[in-house]
Image (spheres, rainbow, N blue to C red):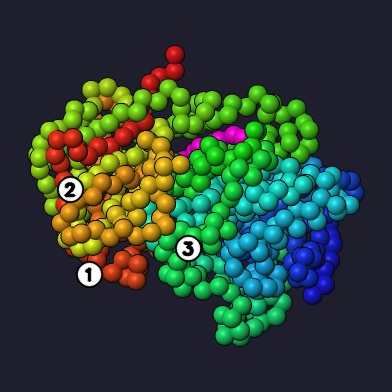
Amino acid sequence: MKQEKSEIRDDMQIDWDVPIPMDDGLILRADVFRPMGGGQYPVIMSYGPYGKSFAFQESRKGAWDRLVELHPEIAANSSNQYQVFELVDPERWVPDGYACLRIDSRGTGRSPGFLDVWSARETKDVYDCVEWAAVQPWSNGKVGMNGISYFAMNAYYVASIQPPHLGAICAWEGAADYYRDVTHHGGIMCEFLFLWFNGTVLKVQHGQGERGPRSRVTGELVAGPETLPEDVLAKIRVDLEKWLLGRPLDSQEYRDRSPVWEMVRVPMLSSANWGGQGIHPRGNFEAFTCAASREKWLEVHGGAHWESFYTDYGVALQKKFFGHYLKGENTGWDKQPPVQLQVRHVDKFIERHENEWPLARTQWTKFYLHPTDCSLTREESRKHAKIEYEAMGDGVNFLTPPLKEEIEITGPVAAKLYVSSSTTDADIFLVLRVFKPDGQEVLFQGASDPHTPIGLGWLRASHRKLDPKFTMPYQPYHTHDEPLPLKPGKPVELDVEIWPTCIVVPPGYRIGLQVRGKDYHYGGPTLRLPGVRYEMTGVGQFLHNHPEDRPAEIFGGKYTLHFKAGQQPYLLLPIIPPKK
């Protein structure tokens, strides 16, 4: 397949299907959008599996319709002919003097090869693409990576191997640790990855050809040009479900698909979503706290996964960052505070700037679980008691009394429990909740579900072993390197990580912790949005139900919470006092 053409459209010079050679001889294909009339420009690069020419409006019509309904300025500021899911719109970047480079990842779209998402081979491809882009006649030699989710993760990964011409990365809602963030929450396998792969990536696997979509701009096959038999396609891609089921513990294979933070030294903007529980926010916070970069910033927002990136707010922040690092412009980024939070209230978000994460003024406060009335208070109980619940039931809810004054919770959250099981293991699902005075739960539009609770945490009891090198009082870090089966009826001590969150709780409201043995359900009617393959129950597509990972005979028994003097379970909350 040769480069098809270069043309001028919508005041841009566009090069279609540009060949990019890899070090193993494979040719990847890319589209380049750049200013007309020559010149050299900084490059905004992306590499991913969704089809570089598959329009957002067609690949995820429901998401696009909801996006422009919420934010009409997105549709108004562009013809939107070149919008692709999770990527920058060239019509909003090329006029500002950027070249936008979109690359179909190996085995997807117009690029041939074996399809193995986030593999070490992919990371090397991204490295080669950065270095290729830096020496093109239209490039000024400075390459930045920008994009949501998959594209953000690739930015972390390639930064670990330090391409010389990678000038800056913006990782917008990007997971990092392939085991802890993406595939196994607390050691419990999440079904999201292979369902996403089978339902989203495979429809644009290279070789789908005529079975796949066509570009609304060029008319060419998005996943072509050839059409291969299904049995042939199956042989040139990873079987993700089989891959995950065969690797229940953390290992070097997961490390190969994760950043090496001490090697990530490039300037970085890490942008998280409070409501992204289940895949992305943990990685964004880890990137900010762990990366070796001396120049790094954290931004945190709310709303749907695809939303803020495309808004005027998001685009302005990205351009302020890249203008500073790729163009040398005086954008004011040198005065940007290290942390920019959209602090979440029950009815709004209020922007606030901070200097670090977790916040230095955090008052780490223990709220103890009480067995007699299922209350949650700052006073430690001395009761010796047990609470038994069905693993597949609704578990146990612990609630504070109505708050006498406003409380802000912002930061990582942790819990300590003492648990036994009627079997040799137990899966613990924790839900941090807030309730209005009338008892109605406070829920938010999360990254992928409109009924998202305040916070979620998970732990498989047999994975309770802690890594003392990385564990903090407010963030347990488990090794996940060996199973430690339970003895039926004998309690074990569990330290559970609840992913970072933020909420300002008004007076009269109550804070709750629900201890369950299965995924959270918000309690209302199941919702299915147009174009969405899964039902909305409060956790989106991040479910943990695979029968081979959670066989009923092990995880369908009865669990018991244990309370006794000196071993009282508690919830550790990051209480934030007002700035002085």
**The C terminus appears in which quarter of the rendering?**
top left
Q: Is residue 456 left or right of residue 297?
A: left
Which residue bears the numbered disc 3? Answer: 193
Assign a secondary structure to mark 3: helix
Residue type at numbered disc 2: Leu
Which residue bears the numbered disc 2? Answer: 561
Q: Nearer the viewer, mark 1 or mark 3?
A: 1
Q: In the depicted view, which residue is nearer to us: 49 or 351? A: 49
Which residue bears the numbered disc 1? Answer: 553
Lower position in the chain sequence, tag 3 or tag 2 = 3
Q: Main secondary structure of the magenta part?
A: strand
Assign a secondary structure to mark 2: strand
Q: Look at the image and say whether residue 297 sits in the magenta stretch.
A: yes
Q: Badge 3: few (under 14), some or many (20 or more) residues near its Cα, within 10 Å?
A: some
Q: Residue at x 37, y 53 (%)?
A: 186
Which image quadrant for residue 413? Answer: top left
What is the CA distance from the residue labelled 1 to the residue labelled 2?
20 Å
Residue type at numbered disc 1: Glu
What is the CA distance from the residue labelled 1 to the residue labelled 3?
25 Å
Q: Residue at x 75, y 27 (%)?
A: 330
Instruction: State whether residue 429 appears in this view.
Output: yes
Q: Residue at x 28, y 47 (%)?
A: 494
Assign a secondary structure to mark 1: helix
Instruction: Return the x and y of residue 82 as percentages of the image width and height.
Output: 69, 56
Give, as a single range, the part of the protein colored magenta.
296-304
